Amino acid sequence: MNDACDRCTRRSWLIGRLSAHLDQIRGNRPAIRGVLALSDRKLIASLGGREQGRITAQWERLDPAAQRQQWQSASTFAICRHSRSFPRSLGDLPDPPAVLHLYGARDRFDHLISSSASVALVGARRASADGLELARELGRTLSLCGVTVISGMALGIDSAAHEGALAAGAQTVAVLACGPERAYPARRKRLHSELAERAVVVSELPPGIAPYRWAFPARNRIIAALAQMAVVVEAAERSGSLITAEIAADLGRAVGAVPGHPSSWHSSGANALLRDGAHLIRDARDILDDAFGVENVGSPSASREPLPLPPDLSGDQKAVIAALDAGFSTVARVAEYCAGVAEVVAPLTELELLGVVERHSDGNYKRL
Amino acid sequence: MVIEVLTFTIDGLRPQAVTVEADLRRGLPSFTIVGLADRAVAEARERVRAALVNCGFEFPMRRLTVNLAPAHLRKAGPGFDLAIACAILAASGQIPTEPLARTAFFGELSLGGEVRSCRGALAVAEGAQAAGLEALVVPPDCAAEARLVDSLRVDALSALSEIGAVLAGESNGDEGDLPARREPGPVYRPDLADLRGHRAAIDALTIAAAGGHNLLLSGPPGTGKTMIARRLPSILPPLSRAEALEVTRIQSIAGLSSDGALADQRPFRAPHHTISAAGLVGGGAVPIPGEATLAHRGVLFLDELSEFDRRALEALRQPLEDGEVTIVRGQETACFPTRFALIAATNPCLCGRGGKACRCSEPELTRHRQRLSGPLLDRLDLVVGVERPSSAALAGEPLTTSAQVAERVAGAREVQIARSGCANAQLVARDMLAATVCSAAATSALSRAYDAGGLSARGRDRALRVARTIADLAGEPEVTVEALAQALGYRHESDRLGSR
């Protein structure tokens, strides 16, 4: 079943063997990418340190067939870059992975990557409730439209995007920074097993390898290369998802970002991307337009009209609606706006019961 | 010859009579105290001996045994000094024995013979009255407090040298030395008029006071949660005399009040979140009352609720429901009253910023929510967000004063007592249906909210009780749809109104 040549098998084994050593590389991200582009012997020479001799001996003695057998027994499948089903888009990278290890059905991978359009949805681990909701919505819609959602299964935006996609068609691929059969972060164990069952999980690292720090930016280059467009849903100033966007831009892929309020800490990184010329993303249609040039490019994307109001609202209720429409969303702010209303909690809750207003967990009320 | 002198010890909050027996006989001079005494009582030997000698009395150079009866009761504290000294004096014929049968003694001695104040004088006086005694001799600092008890003569004794005169009835202590009663001068009391803005929080505080509901304030640091909570005592109904005596007794035993006046304010206790379960509900080898009891008839404020030890909060649940807590330690059992209004405050999340400014990660938010769940949270009927007041509100006039709100609260309480005999928060399931009659619109709104699936059964029950209180404040006989909607607005975050 495995589809990796002997040379690439050795290479992949070596990357796994050296993964602890790779963490020693100090310095910026280009450094690690330069290292990953080195040949096997140079890699051992530059990273092996005192273990150099031992690793060289192990590398020379390695039996590729036995190694592939071992990977298979961990129920993963290896595809090397000489295989026909290896994603061609990864070839755009100056340092493409030699082998992709798949966890989940292999034919699904072919369908998800080689014969479908794909978009990377990435963002911060520390995301706002709104950001998570939007990521879920984008994942759901893109998956429904047959566009593969590629992300990293990290906490926050990444997981929300996967969840959304799983909820509609499971058109999604997770790229991990550890062996693909390992659920990392552990909190996403259920998501991981669902992805393996209904979609596919891939990694550059062979099974059994733990996540190391260097592997996260390295994993981001795979996410960026696999997708035709990278969309940052929510990212603070120093978020890892900005690395993905940067690599995607370097590869000539489209980059999009969801705008946030200028003062919002959560969206400062995404806003900076927009300032630098990223596509502005409001909803899934914006992504489809920008990435795939659907005909109505440039037409204003419909920001959803709020639900129509029931006809027989009381004066207090109308005043409260006016406050919400003017952007006052908490009880105190609404009360300030509606100076004539003695008590705003009751009308707000009545509107909630009517189903035209919703209270969020942070205490903000919103029109539906 | 055996002499018996009466005194009292505090067992939990109850006074227990203790008979001090002194026996003098021939033999090598010695002085022994028996009868399950703790260290402070054992040390009484040295204090009593020095005090007697320094006051010009003679310390009998014979074999002296003092027994504290009943022997099974654990005796703690220095309050036995005076009774022991009197027993010795009577046994050695230095004071008359005849008045001792009708009098109890309570006080600590200094080496020079002055009588020092001890904790719990009010409880001791109540014990002396219940035991049918005529008089109680106490330190001058405790006299005012002991005199709160009717039909008991309280003699203030400032030094042991005056014991003869006091027993002869010549001097009723020295009234001139008594501390003056607290002057009813201008005392600063927290008042709602100190607040600016915070309309929703004041409404919630009013409802909590009127219906006896427990309240959770949620908001970023520095928005005024503590300031709001601090003002709940000012709108609760004033203490009745019986309640004031209870509060004074507890404060005296805990050593909190020193001026001997009757408590005129409901207590407000705000223990730090590092408090243990025993500190909160009472405990110790000899059980002493905890913060829940110190807040009896007043307010217990738990700031940073999510930071409290889970076990401490669990321990609070039963006292919150029953109004008392029974502590069993070894052979000791103590029952402490715990009727208090609970106010808790919490940050909306771990970083405390809340809303759009929040920087918490998803697991941090989950952890915060988990810490804020559990049975205690179920007992909090109202949840209200506290927001930063706007600059206009800060510059403006206060929305109301405590006096105005207290009047509405008292009115609503009366209606509740007349209807069900208790505050709405204490309504038992049997009376709920009869008490919370809803208007047709309110009934349909409530069933819509419940049937949508987001509202828990407990959340529905809480909403009904709170709505009943809101209707009582508005003077409505039925629960109106407005009252119900407002009550639902104060629901927990986990209770959702929509189907989502």
Image: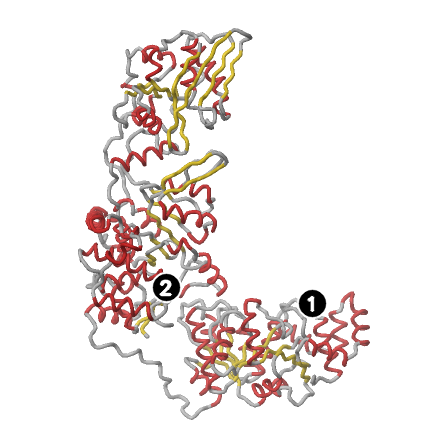
Tally of marks? 2
Left or right: residue A164 versus residue A365 is: right
Which image quarter holds the N terminus of chain B? top left
* Label 1 secondary element: helix
Q: Amino acid at mark 2?
A: Ser
Which of the pair B176/B456 is nearer the observer? B456
User: Dot 1 falls on which chain?
Assistant: A
Q: Say which quarter of the image contains residue A294.
A: bottom left
- The x and y percentages for residue A91 are 63, 86
Q: Image height check: is B254 above or below A285?
A: above
Answer left or right for A80 relative to A286: right
Disc 1 packing (10 Å; few <14; some 14–19; many ≥20):
some
| Residue position for label 1 | A20
Q: Which of the image's four quarters has the C terminus of chain B? A: bottom left
Of helix, strand and loop, which one carries label 2?
loop
Q: Nearer the viewer, residue B413 or B357?
A: B413
Asked if the residue at tag 1 contacts the one at tag 2, i.e. Cβ–Cβ closer than 8 Å, the answer is no
Any mark on residue B456, and which?
2
Q: Are marks 2 and 1 on the same chain?
A: no
Q: Position of residue A31 (x, y in %)?
A: 65, 72
B129 shown above or below B215: above
Q: Position of residue B365 (x, y in %)?
A: 46, 62
Nearer to us in this view, B328 or A316: B328
The residue under the point 31% across, 71% down is A357
